[in-house]
Amino acid sequence: MHGVNQTAYGLWTAVIFNIVIFGLFAYSAFKPATKRDWRTFGAFTAFIVALFSEMFGYPLTIYILYSILGRNYPVLDPFTHYNGHLWVALAGGSPILFNILHPLSNLLIFSGLVVISIGWRAIHSGNGGLVTSGIYRFVRHPQYSGFILTIIGFLIQWPTIITLIMAPILFVMYTRLAKKEEKEMIKMFGEEYIKYMKEVPRFIPKINFRIGKH
């Protein structure tokens, strides 16, 4: 593991390794079949390529910001691993913010991967039937929820100009893909799925705050 005062760039083996690992995981969970599926998968792949290329390869965003801000850049050495966390750097290298955001981002990333995995297992164990149990009791599209959670985690941990632009585009693509799948499910399951749609949200679980009667 790199120390906080060490650079963490030019590590192209790490770039390739992370792209391959996350790419294969996304492919196995997403299983693209249609052109729309492949476009969505391709967009996510482009996101992780841009992310890890800057995280371990060449810090383009930091160079751009440093060239614009010059001496006004909020930290003295923007090219250490510690200051590569852009939110922390823009806060003047705050160790408190680092200690909050870094574990939080990891929690979101790995929680997203777990949600994707659980959703994938549930849908493939359904043998073509309508799955409304398990994680599907809380959201209709847990795999997309997991991808969104993972992307948000990466944006907290290592935002770049490119990924900040790409993230909302990916969210729109997931929403469109989810709507297309819902139309197909209505054709297959009719009123049963329409009722399910009314009861279960698309991506974000409902939080019910129940207050006891006095």
Image (cartoon, grey):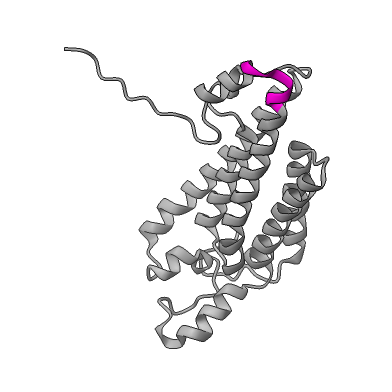
How many discs appear? Answer: 0
Question: For the point 61% across and 18% down, which residue is it?
Answer: 132
- Taking depth in this image into account, of 48 and 139 the one nearest to the observer is 139
Residue 45, quarter of picture: bottom right
> Is 17 within the magenta?
no
> Is 189 within the magenta?
yes
The image shows residue 48 at horizontal and vertical percentages of: 68, 56
**For residue 62, above or below residue 127:** below
The image shows residue 21 at horizontal and vertical percentages of: 75, 48
- Taking depth in this image into account, of 159 and 85 the one nearest to the observer is 159
Prevalent SS, magenta region: helix
The image shows residue 47 at horizontal and vertical percentages of: 67, 58
Which portion, as a residue range, is magenta? 185-191
Left of 48 or right of it: where is 77? Answer: left
**For residue 172, above or below residue 91:** above
**For residue 79, above or below residue 26:** below
